[in-house]
Amino acid sequence: MKSEHGFARNQAMNLQGAETIAVQALAWLAEEPGRIGGFLAQSGIDPASLRKAAGEPAFLAAILDHLCQNEPDLLTFAANAGLSPMEIDRARLILAGPQGHLDP
């Protein structure tokens, strides 16, 4: 079964698929001022810098990390995007790099 992101659920996700999920998550966060405000406060980035930062894998990983830390938002985004929470976490790990975690 293929998701709308072009990868089969039982195949390994690639970097492009992970980036697509993160950009969708950013757009979803931006739909509600409270959601994006929480992310901006946690990340320390200002709204004017979002567009430039969105091209960085570490920033994209931070978006998904933020979602993974908030189960209600994770489940809502996953349902809206037609993804499982595990796919979102897999994308986060891909974007975070070989260590599979974000640098503090």
Image (cartoon, rainbow, N blue to C red):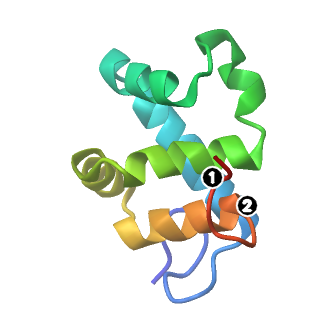
Bin the neighbour count of mark 2 within 10 Å (Cα to Cα): few under 14, some 14-19, many 20 and up: some
Q: Determine contact: label 2, label 1, CB under 8 Å.
A: yes
Residue 84 appears in the picture as rendered: no
On-image quarter of the N terminus? bottom left
Q: What amino acid is at disc 1?
A: Thr
Using the rendered view, name the quadrant where residue 18 is placed. Answer: bottom right
Q: What amino acid is at disc 2?
A: Gln
Q: Nearer the viewer, residue 70 or 79?
A: 70
| Residue 84 image position (x, y, % from top left) | 36, 69
Residue appearing at x 28%, y 44% in the figure: 73
Q: Residue furthest top?
A: 48
Q: Nearer the viewer, residue 27 or 2?
A: 27
Using the rendered view, name the quadrant where residue 101 is placed. Answer: bottom right
Instruction: Provide the secondary structure element on which disc 2 rests.
Output: helix
**Residue 20's disc number:** 1
**Residue 16's disc number:** 2
Residue appearing at x 60%, y 67% in the figure: 93
Residue 80 appears in the picture as rendered: yes
Residue appearing at x 59%, y 13% in the figure: 47
